[in-house]
């Protein structure tokens, strides 16, 4: 139940050619407290409830618990979430022995594309594809819970 991941900006859409699949995701937050973020997600035709704990100082590791729930339950819970539902398309992109999850955000976060890679330990190495840009691991502005409150389109460039 410990999640270890690193997060990067994406500098081109070249990842699309290597994607093995993609899904539309809609998600909202019942609670955005950093100590216990509670997320409701609809991915394709499935619903999920996820609880995440506070990240470590580097932003790479935190507690995560996720359970699949009925689609109807997820739809009902989305209606009572905090303001700022996140919309995105997630591409699953195999690179070497890892799979990058590349999120193309829509709506109020349109223009933002972020890639995450899950690791088995913080020191694990991985192949970095050419489309991978600046690392933003630990930058809370890029947490989905924060993007729901302060969307990318509102940031000063």
Image (cartoon, rainbow, N blue to C red):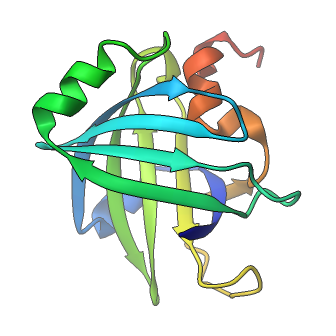
Residue in front for this viewpoint, 3 or 92: 3
* 95 left or right of 11 in image: left
> Which quadrant of the figure has residue 48?
top left
Image quadrant containing the C terminus: top right
Question: Can you give x and y, in whole percent of width and height, for residue 13 in the image?
Answer: 43, 50
> Which quadrant of the figure has residue 106?
top left
Q: Residue at x 66, y 38 (%)?
A: 142
Label count reads 0
- Residue 102 visible here: yes
Q: Residue at x 32, y 54 (%)?
A: 67
Name above or below for residue 5 compared with residue 67: below
Question: Can you give x and y, in whole percent of width and height, for residue 17 in the image?
Answer: 30, 63
- Residue 14 visible here: no
Q: Residue at x 46, y 90 (%)?
A: 97
Residue in front for this viewpoint, 11 or 64: 64
* 109 left or right of 62 in image: left
Q: Residue at x 20, y 24 (%)?
A: 75
Name above or below for residue 6 compared with residue 44: below
Question: Can you give x and y, in whole percent of width and height, for residue 116 in the image?
Answer: 55, 60
Question: Can you give x and y, in whole percent of width and height, for residue 151 in the image?
Answer: 59, 18
Q: Residue furthest right?
A: 57
* 73 left or right of 98 in image: left
Name above or below for residue 105 compared with residue 91: above
């Amino acid at each position: 139940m410990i999640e270890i991941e690193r997060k990067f900006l994406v500098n081109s859409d070249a990842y699309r050619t290597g994607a093995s699949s993609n899904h539309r995701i809609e998600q909202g937050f019942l609670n955005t407290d950093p100590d216990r973020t509670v997320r409701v997600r609809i991915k394709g035709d499935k619903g999920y409830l996820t609880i995440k704990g506070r990240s470590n100082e580097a932003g790479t590791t935190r507690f995560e618990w996720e359970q699949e729930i009925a689609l109807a339950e997820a739809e009902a819970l989305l209606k009572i979430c905090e303001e700022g539902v996140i919309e995105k398309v997630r591409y699953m992109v195999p690179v070497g022995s890892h799979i990058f999850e590349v999120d193309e955000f829509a709506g109020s976060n349109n223009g933002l594309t972020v890639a995450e890679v899950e690791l088995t330990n913080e020191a694990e190495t991985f192949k970095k594809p050419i489309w991978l840009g600046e690392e933003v691991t630990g930058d809370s502005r890029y947490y989905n819970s924060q993007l729901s409150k302060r969307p990318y389109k509102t940031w000063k460039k």
